Amino acid sequence: MKPKPEIEGGRFPRTDYFFHAGFKGWSGSWSNDDGQFRRHNLGREYLIESARERAKEMAVFAIILATAAWPVIYMIVTIVQMYRKN
């Protein structure tokens, strides 16, 4: 006998629409090592981490930009020196 497929009607799997994860008493606090509870400002932490990542990306972009601009700057300096000799 074939097992019953998990997909009903050939399109979507069965879903338990009444599932509840049970976050009844969760208040957004967590216990640190000494047992005291403290509240975190997740928005502030996200912005700080985002600023750090943005600074790293800007530093890498500046290195790439300087590397790409170096041949152009060198060419301009060479042309100016060539015209000064004449």
Image (cartoon, helix red, strand yellow):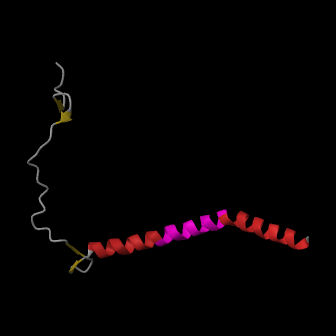
Q: Quadrant of the N terminus?
A: top left
**Magenta portion: prevailing SS class:** helix
**Is residue 60 located in the magenta-colored stretch of the structure?**
yes
Residue 12 location (% of width, % of height): 19, 35
Residue 48 falls left or right of residue 1: right
Query: Foreground residue, 61 or 52?
Result: 61
Q: Which residues are magenta?
A: 55-68
Q: Nearer the viewer, residue 28 or 76?
A: 76
Residue, x 18% and y 25% (percent of image)?
3
Nearest the eye: 79 or 3: 79
Residue 21 shown in magenta = no
Horizontal placement of 36 versus 51: left or right?
A: left
Is 75 left or right of 55, judged from the image as shown?
A: right
Taking 81 as reference, is 36 above or below it?
below
Q: Quadrant of residue 51?
A: bottom left
Q: Is residue 64 above or below residue 47?
A: above
Q: Where is residue 50? Give x, y as percent.
A: 39, 70
Q: Quadrant of residue 2?
A: top left
Residue found farthest to the top: 1
Quadrant for residue 8, please give it: top left
Q: Is residue 76 left or right of residue 61?
A: right
Please give the name of the residue rendered at 27% of the width and 77% of the height, measured from the top-left corner. Answer: 33
